Image (cartoon, rainbow, N blue to C red):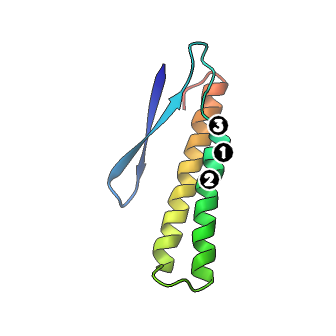
């Protein structure tokens, strides 16, 4: 069984569908904590590159993307917590 949730990223006008993959017993098969951590780490590393003066990175763009990645990670966490507790996100 596969449930799909959608998150809209403001100012981009695109929709990202986040699959929550569960088995026949309803057990999540995606390590949501790892995905959330990856998204947050990616944004953090971009910020470090900007702070280090890396060429070709716009500070405002990196900041905006980092915020959106963190929001997406939060939505994944909320959806998985809701699923685990038997509620809907």
Whether residues under marks 1 and 3 lie with C-beta atoms below 8 angstroms apart, the answer is: yes
Crowding near pointer 2: few (<14 within 10 Å), some, many (20+)?
A: some
C-beta proximity under 8 Å, tags 2 and 1: yes
- Contact, CB < 8 Å: mark 2 with mark 3? no
- Above or below residue 85? Residue 10 is below
Which residue lies most toward the front here? 55
Query: Which residue is more in the foreground, 71 or 44?
Result: 44
Measure how far apart labels 2 and 1 are at the Cα level.
6 Å
Q: Report x, y in % for residue 54.
A: 55, 83
Q: Is residue 52 left or right of residue 57?
A: right
Residue at mark 2: 38
Residue at point 61% right, 13% down? 25
Mark 1 and mark 3: span between their CA atoms?
5 Å
User: Which residue is the site of mark 3?
Assistant: 31
Q: CA distance from mark 2 to mark 3?
A: 11 Å
Report the side of 69 relative to 82 (left or right).
Answer: left
SS of the residue under disc 2:
helix
Image quarter for residue 86? top right
Element carrying mark 1: helix
Tag 1 residue: 34
Which numbered tag is attached to residue 85? none
Q: Is residue 55 above or below residue 73?
A: below
Q: Is residue 54 above or below residue 9?
A: below
Query: In the image, what residue occupies the spot 48% across and 76% down?
Result: 60
User: Percent position (x, y) of residue 50?
Assistant: 57, 79
Q: Position of residue 22 (x, y in %)?
A: 56, 23
| Among the two numbered marks 2 and 3 on one chain, the one whose residue lies closer to the N terminus | 3
Q: Residue at x 32, y 54 (%)?
A: 13
Q: Give left or right: position of 7 versus 83.
A: left
């Amino acid at each position: 069984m596969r449930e799909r949730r959608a998150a809209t990223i403001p100012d981009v006008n695109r929709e990202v569908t986040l699959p929550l993959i569960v088995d026949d017993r309803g057990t999540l098969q995606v390590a949501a904590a790892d995905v959330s951590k990856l998204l947050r780490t990616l944004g953090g590393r971009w910020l470090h590159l900007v702070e280090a003066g890396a060429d070709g990175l716009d500070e405002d763009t990196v900041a905006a993307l980092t915020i959106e990645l963190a929001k997406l990670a939060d939505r994944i966490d909320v959806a998985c917590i809701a699923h685990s507790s038997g509620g809907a996100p």
